[in-house]
Image (tube, helix red, strand yellow):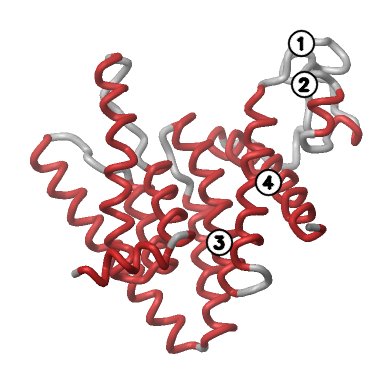
Amino acid sequence: MLYLVFFFSLGCIMGSFYYVVGTRLPNRESLIKPRSHCTYCNHILKWYELIPVVSYLFLKGKCFHCKEKISKEYLIYEVFTGILFALCFWKYGFSYELLVSLVLSSLVVLIFITDFKYMMILDSYLIVSALLLFLFRLIFFGLQNALLNVLYGFLIFLIMLFVGYVGTFLFKREALGGGDIKFSFILGMALGFKHGLIALVFSTFLALPYAVGVLLLKRNNEVPFGPFLVSSTFIVYFFLEKFQLILNLF
């Protein structure tokens, strides 16, 4: 129980950091300067105003200085990341799978923020994630196994690249964003080739209801695919044994 609380707390802290990363980097802003501040009055936040979840609840969702409402997104992403981290530890304990699932959890949060807000997936956290996945595989299973996972990532990347080209040719517009295609490399590294293909197919089913809703509401014709792609990757990894049963049917 103590470890679950620890990982939930760690997730809340990282969720707060990821929100800063996800809202600053797309706007080419520094992660260091300016310091965390109220977006209304520019009040520099004190340490006790920066405690994830606790500060938001204590301040009743308002700036301590000007009393303007603080976006609920801070609280949502902090709690969301905390729950994901706690679930990962509950499922895997201290293991290789825990490390991979924490990387995927982090990508879920980051891609949700940037793709829904700015319709982009940044190269920076994809590169860091790929390096971490390779390093974890290298430490636990050796160089040959780590390189094999890189190959799986490259194969899934090529498949997505091909799908993107075909979609662009058929619809006369960009069918897949560059970030989605690049993320598929991470997907292949984390899941392998067969499970990676399942995740690609599953992601389209996850995205379909949202896409239909956007089209019916006629808000726009662009649907961010990244959140559904990364969610599918995490779900398939988290329930790998269940999806293995599907593979066994074939």
Circles 1 and 3 in contact, beta carbons < 8 Å: no
Q: Amino acid at mark 2?
A: Cys
* Residue depicted at 56% across the width and 33% down the height: 27
Residue located 75% across and 52% down the image = 10
Q: Nearer the viewer, mark 1 or mark 4?
A: 4
Which structural element holds mark 1?
A: loop
The quadrant the N terminus occupies is bottom right
Q: Hey, what amino acid is under mark 1?
A: Glu
Classed neighbour count for the residue bearing mark 1: other residues with Cα under 10 Å, few (<14), some (14–19), many (≥20): some
Q: Residue at x 78, y 60 (%)?
A: 3
Mark 2 and mark 1: Cα distance apart in space: 9 Å
Q: CA distance from mark 4 to mark 3?
A: 13 Å
Disc 3 marks which amino acid?
Ser
**First along the sequence among labels 4 and 3:** 4
Q: What residue type is disc 4 on?
A: Gly
Tell me how far mark 1 sits from mark 3, CA to CA.
37 Å
Q: How many labels, in total?
A: 4
Report helix, strand or loop for mark 4: helix
Q: What x and y, as percent, mark residue 204?
A: 27, 44
Residue at which label 1 appears:
68
Q: Residues within 10 Å of mark 2 (few under 14, many from 20)?
A: some
Identify the secondary structure beneath mark 2. Answer: loop
Q: Nearer the viewer, mark 3 or mark 2?
A: 3
How much space separates mark 3 and mark 2, taking CA atoms? 33 Å
Mark 3 lies on residue? 101
Between residues 109 and 248, which one lies in front from this camera angle?
248
Specify which label sits upstream in the sequence, 1 or 3.
1
- Measured as percent of width and height from the top left, residue 154 is found at 32, 69
For label 2, the residue is 38
Q: Residue 139's mark?
A: none
User: Is the residue 242 above or below the residue 43 in the image?
Assistant: below
Q: Which residue is mark 4?
A: 82
